Image (tube, grey):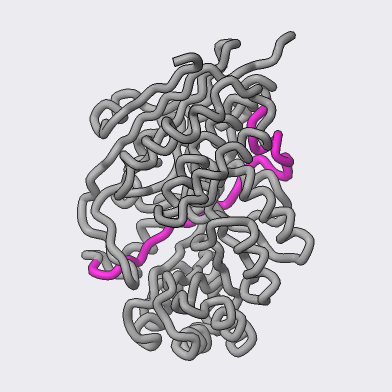
Amino acid sequence: MNRKATIETIETISIRVPLSRVYRGSQYQMTHRSTVIARVHTDVGVVGEAYVGDEDEGLDKIEEILHEELAPVVLGQELLASERIWRATRPAAFDILRDRRLGLVAAAAVDAAVWDAIGKVLGVPLWKLWGGFRDDVSVISIGGYYDSELSVGDEVEILRKRGLAGMKLKVGGRTPEEDAERFRQARAAGGDDFILCADANQGYSPGEAVRFARLVADHGLFWFEEPCRWPNDHRGMRDVRFHSGARVCAGQSELSATGCLDLINAGAVDFCNFDSSWSGGATEWRRVAALAAMVDVGMAHHEEPQISSHLLASIPHGAFVEVFDPDRDPIWWNLVANRPVLERGRMRLTDRPGLGWDLDADFIDDHLSSSRVSSRGE
């Protein structure tokens, strides 16, 4: 390609998919899975396409921010100027009277679509463009929700048959003793080679978290995610690490690389599961990955396999890709038409340029919530 690619049009499509039942964690519940698909059209015919976030509220606001605040500063930009584009979108998170995450998700949608287009222009998959450390990643499932009709043991058996390498078990909504028993049941069903993490979603006090970690210390707890309630969680997680010996994972609730730096400097985490879709995009996630590498902290990613698979495969200290049960995330399992088949718990990344995903048009039409287009010169 002999000339610069320039962004000419930004298109968005929002979809909202009802779940088969209510999914309850320690302090929250979900009834729908929703996302914003962004398409960046360039003047050389290349179209970048990505979807981000799992927002069930605020879809209209995210699209409004994207078109009314981001499109005016992104349209006309050179595609390869990814850092300049990212910086131009950052003020969407500056409004102190608005949920900052709405602006960050809008910015992440643009960032992901821009990177997909860059990969397509260069003819390189993003996992390779971002570092190319490996071409496959382990995949675990998030599960063990309260009020499930299945026992924890039955759910683990299903995951093993589906080809998953492990499970992140929901805890924090009951006593440490009750949750520890559920964890032991999962281990018995999964066996010693089944990766088993616990995720409290900030549900425990530090003392309760230490009790839980000690109760399962001999049952292969790989990491303990967001063990402590939010008001003083950095210090609480540090204390859980020191007093229990458990490896702690956190970062999905942070909105910036600076927030993750504070987590790391506080000695609060062994793994940082920063969420690129909730924090402004892969550009910001990669900054955190660089910080973590300098101090031997592992990198994870909260959900979002469509982008996390590329990010985690690109670096030497990347952990597992996280997916949900198909009923909990019908978008990943149905929107991505060429989703890779799992082999012995691992997903092999595509060599197709960019993200490499084909999005199912019929699924989009069936669950369409809204759509908008902004073009240069309008």
In this rendering, the answer to whether 120 lies above or below 310 is above
Q: In the image, residue 66 lies at what x, y percent? A: 44, 35
The magenta span reads 124-147
Q: Quadrant of the C terminus?
A: top left
Is 20 drawn above or below residue 348 in the view shown?
Answer: below
Q: Where is residue 337 in the image (x, y as percent from the top left)?
A: 41, 29
Q: Which residue is drawn at 57% across and 84% down?
A: 240
Q: Position of residue 305 (x, y in %)?
A: 49, 45
Judge whether residue 135 is colored magenta: yes
Name the residue located 53 percent from the left edge and 53 percent from the top edge. Answer: 275
Q: Which of 300 and 181 is in front in this view?
A: 300
Point 34% across, 72% down: residue? 26
* Residue nearest the viewer, comparing 332 with 100: 100
Q: Does the magenta stretch include residue 280?
A: no
Is 120 displayed left or right of 50 in the figure? right
Question: What is the count of numbered marks?
Answer: 0
Along the line of sight, which residue is nearer the eye, 233 or 69?
A: 69
Q: Give the vertical position of 250 relative to 366 (above or below).
A: below
Q: Is residue 117 left or right of residue 154?
A: right
Tell me if residue 201 can be seen. Answer: yes
Residue 369 quadrant? top left
Quarter of the N terminus within the rendering: top right
Please say whether residue 160 is visible from this viewpoint.
no
Query: Which of the pair 279/212 is nearer the observer?
Result: 279
Q: Residue furthest right?
A: 294
**Residue at the image point whose x is 33% and y is 34% from the top:** 14
Q: In which quarter of the image is residue 362?
A: top left
